[in-house]
Amino acid sequence: MACGGGGGGGGAPPTPACDATCLDAVALYGMRMTMKVVYNVTLQGQPVGAQDRNAPCPQGGSVHVHGTATSNADQGTTVVALTYDFAQCHVTQVDSDPTHAFDLTLTGSITEQGDLAVQPSSTTSLQLQSGAMTLGGQVYSPGIDYSADACALTLGQDGNNLSGTLCGRPAGVTL
């Protein structure tokens, strides 16, 4: 993440500056963390196979998750082919790490395909894609206005590294 800067002085160190690359990274972090929470709340522990669940979002809006999820016990993974349809899904996270703080509203559909690690010995390997995802609100701490409207995104997650493009820009974050 390209978050850096700040100056000297007395007292607590200032919060580093967050440039456009940093803002995209925080927004992607918020989006991916939201997808993880939605998966855990709606699908974790459900029978394998076809999935179709709706859930309210914490601060308003909703999400519809549908597709398939199957277990691969030999590899310790769950193989997913899911779509997350976000409808004004408002989520907030306060964190002492400014790069993990967000107040976002997500609108649009994201497909998630690949392997989710369910055992420490396995690795998450996913592809995330959307033709028109909107992320808006504030990211970072203190909050900075952020907007990515109807953007295409193509991301790959390898372990805790998420990278690819957002609105045609290179983007990524370590989760």
Image (cartoon, rainbow, N blue to C red):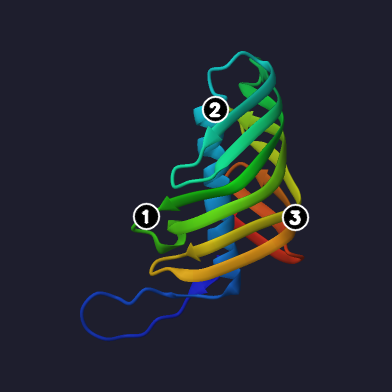
The answer to whether mark 1 and mark 3 are in CB contact below 8 A is no
- Viewer-nearest residue: 41 or 15: 41
Q: Horizontal and vertical percent for residue 64?
A: 63, 35
Of all residues, the one furthest to the left in this rendering is 11
- Earlier in the chain: of badge 2 and badge 1, it is 2
Q: Horizontal and vertical percent for residue 51?
A: 67, 22
Residue annotated with mark 1:
94
Residue annotated with mark 3:
132
The amino acid sitting under disc 1 is Val
Q: Secondary structure at mark 2?
A: helix
Q: CA distance from mark 2 to mark 1?
A: 23 Å
Q: Specify whether 154 is left or right of 20.
A: right
Residue at 62% in and 44% down: 86
The amino acid sitting under disc 3 is Ala
Q: Secondary structure at mark 1?
A: loop
Residue at 61% in and 49% down: 161
* Residue 175 appearing in the image: no
Residue at 61% in and 13% down: 47
Q: Is residue 75 above or below residue 33?
A: above
Q: Horizontal and vertical percent for residue 173?
A: 58, 56
Residue at 37% in and 55% down: 94
Q: CA distance from mark 1 to mark 3?
A: 27 Å
Residue annotated with mark 2:
42
* Residue 71 appearing in the image: yes
Q: Nearer the viewer, mark 1 or mark 3?
A: 3
Q: Specify whether 162 is left or right of 139.
A: right
